[in-house]
Image (cartoon, rainbow, N blue to C red):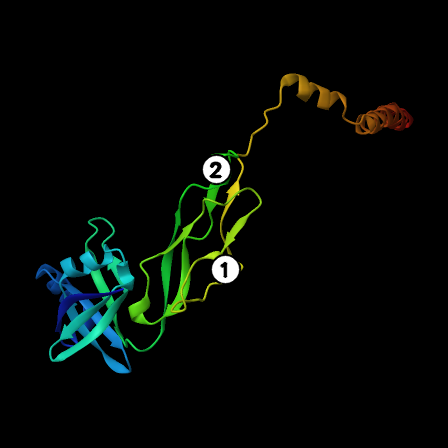
Amino acid sequence: MPTSELVEAKARPADEARTKNAARRVRRSGRVPAVVYGAKKESIPITVDPKQITRILHSDSGHNTVFDLSVGDERTKAMIVDWQFEPIKGTLMHIDLKRIAMDQALRVSVPVELTGTAEGVKTQGGILEQMLREVEIECLPGDIPDQISVEISHLVFGQVLRVSDLPHDGKVKFVTDANQPVAHITSVKETVTETPTEAGAEVAAAPAEPEVIKKGKQETEEAAAPAETGKKSEGKKKE
């Protein structure tokens, strides 16, 4: 979803962009190191305002937001394609931006939102399970939706909501497999605990054949033992 927000970036020397010390200096100055590429132009190392980027990432359209990017004399449409956060403090560490041509279709992933209460949950005691939370679509940058919303009040046991059931206009083409399940109604799985009586009955009902074989083996070994002892004794007596 395009926005009128203007992100003013500052170019930085290419040799400095490769060093960690230079990146630290950029962050200490209150900005974030970044790079912009795409549209068959060379990539440019830049710095941006982290507050602006954070505001875009937290907007309804998130990283799919198309905004104006200014770098010196160049002004273009751009999107955020990658970003890194510091794991402890949660501050932005680096941003990748891509130039966008508004007349060329691109592929993006958008969230799927389920609205309403499914009949299978309301009257059948089931649980709604959403297996797919994002779908990949293809469309012009100006037609990127914030999300794909689908009403699920009709959903009952035995029905599966698939990608092919998601609403869309002719401006959006689904790239995700049309047969891929999005959501369905599932039942609560019950855990059966065996009682001592049931456990005892299973033991009693177990086949006795292994025990008979084991017992026969023991008797054979015991019967063979005295004979073996006798042979050893005779040998000693002859000596």
**Quarter of the rendering containing residue 26:** bottom left
Q: Secondary structure at mark 2?
A: helix
**Quarter of the rendering containing residue 68:** bottom left
Residue 42 in the image: above or below residue 120: below
| Left or right, 216 with reference to 195 | right
| Left or right, 186 with reference to 201 | left
Which residue is more in the foreground, 125 or 194? 125
Q: Position of residue 221 (x, y in %)?
A: 84, 27
| Residue type at the position of mark 1 | Ser
Q: Quadrant of the C terminus?
A: top right
Q: Secondary structure at mark 1?
A: helix
Q: Which residue is mark 1?
A: 164
| Disc sitting over residue 74 in the figure | none
Q: Quadrant of the N terminus?
A: bottom left
Residue 3 in the image: above or below residue 72: above
* Classed neighbour count for the residue bearing mark 2: other residues with Cα under 10 Å, few (<14), some (14–19), many (≥20): some
Q: Which residue is mark 2?
A: 121
Which residue is more in the foreground, 171 or 196? 171
**Alpha carbons under labels 2 and 1: distance apart:** 22 Å
Is any atom of residue 14 visible in this view?
no
Residue 129 in the image: above or below residue 96: above
Q: Position of residue 234 (x, y in %)?
A: 90, 26
Q: Position of residue 15 (x, y in %)?
A: 17, 76
Q: Residue at x 15, y 79 (%)?
A: 74
* Classed neighbour count for the residue bearing mark 1: other residues with Cα under 10 Å, few (<14), some (14–19), many (≥20): some
Q: Position of residue 67 (x, y in %)?
A: 21, 68
| Left or right, 203 with reference to 101 | right
| Residue type at the position of mark 2 | Val
Sequence-first disc among 2 and 1: 2
